[in-house]
Image (cartoon, rainbow, N blue to C red):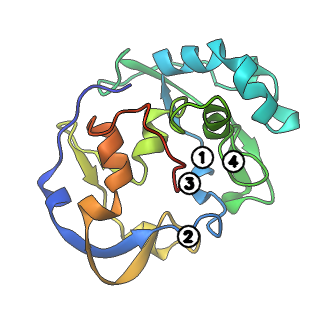
Amino acid sequence: MPKAHRLHPRMEGAEPIQRCDFPKCRAACCVYGTWVDLDRAEDILAHADQILPHMPPAHREPDLWFDHQEEDDPHTTSGKVTHTTVVPDPEHYGGTACIFMREDYHCALQTAAIKADLHPWHFKPFYCILHPLDLDEHGRISLDEIHLLLAEPASCLRPADRSIPLKETFSEELDYLLGKINKSDYGRSTR
């Protein structure tokens, strides 16, 4: 899990946005894969036997799940990240997808955790859980500029007809990331 986080003051406000309409969005957020803490990548590989049955059949080779290049990341416990492999997917938004995305647009990592009776995000990379939230230069949880996300037809965010508190819109992620829930008290995530 990542280092402890605080909230950016913007998260105290309300904005006229709401979450994606999964599965109608067809997991557009998975188009470019994600950064993964090296510790989390090692944990995923150590549990490959639990994850493999839920992977798309063409991607059941654990050695291919990550690009094996490392970059520094001060927001992760190991201080280093690697990237999930991005595969061509002409049926998916943008024509590519994270290797862990299934044909039903669910994440194989999340599916494996649920089947193992764990919190749905047990295996998920930090940056997947965080998205579309982001970290500012001080490591505080914030929301990036959203005008581009709102313009995308398969966006993780959609306009809302009223301002909704950001803490409400992102309550599930914030509770998880800020340690306000017991990760063994799980329920099916909306993403």
Above or below: residue 155 compared with residue 56: below
Residue 29's label in the rendered image is: 3
For the residues labelled 2 and 3, the Cα–Cα distance comes to: 12 Å
Residue 190, position as x, y percentages in the image: 52, 56
Task: Mark 4: give few (<14), some (14-19) or many (20+) Cα within 10 Å.
Answer: many
Amino acid on which the number 4 mark rests in the picture: Ala
Residue 188, position as x, y percentages in the image: 54, 49
Q: Earlier in the sequence, mark 4 or mark 2?
A: 2
Mark 2 vs mark 1: in front: 2
Residue 120, position as x, y percentages in the image: 54, 39
Where does label 2 land, which residue?
A: 21
Where does label 4 land, which residue?
A: 97
Whether the residues at callouts 4 and 3 have beta carbons within 8 Å, the answer is no
Specify the farthest residue to the bottom: 161
Above or below: residue 53 compared with residue 43: below
**Position of residue 127 in the picture relative to residue 84 (left or right):** left
Task: Tell me the SS state at disc 2.
Answer: loop
Q: Residue at x 65, y 43 (%)?
A: 107
Q: Residue at x 67, y 62 (%)?
A: 26
For the residues labelled 3 and 1, the Cα–Cα distance comes to: 8 Å
Whether the residues at callouts 2 and 3 have beta carbons within 8 Å, the answer is no
For the residues labelled 4 and 1, the Cα–Cα distance comes to: 6 Å
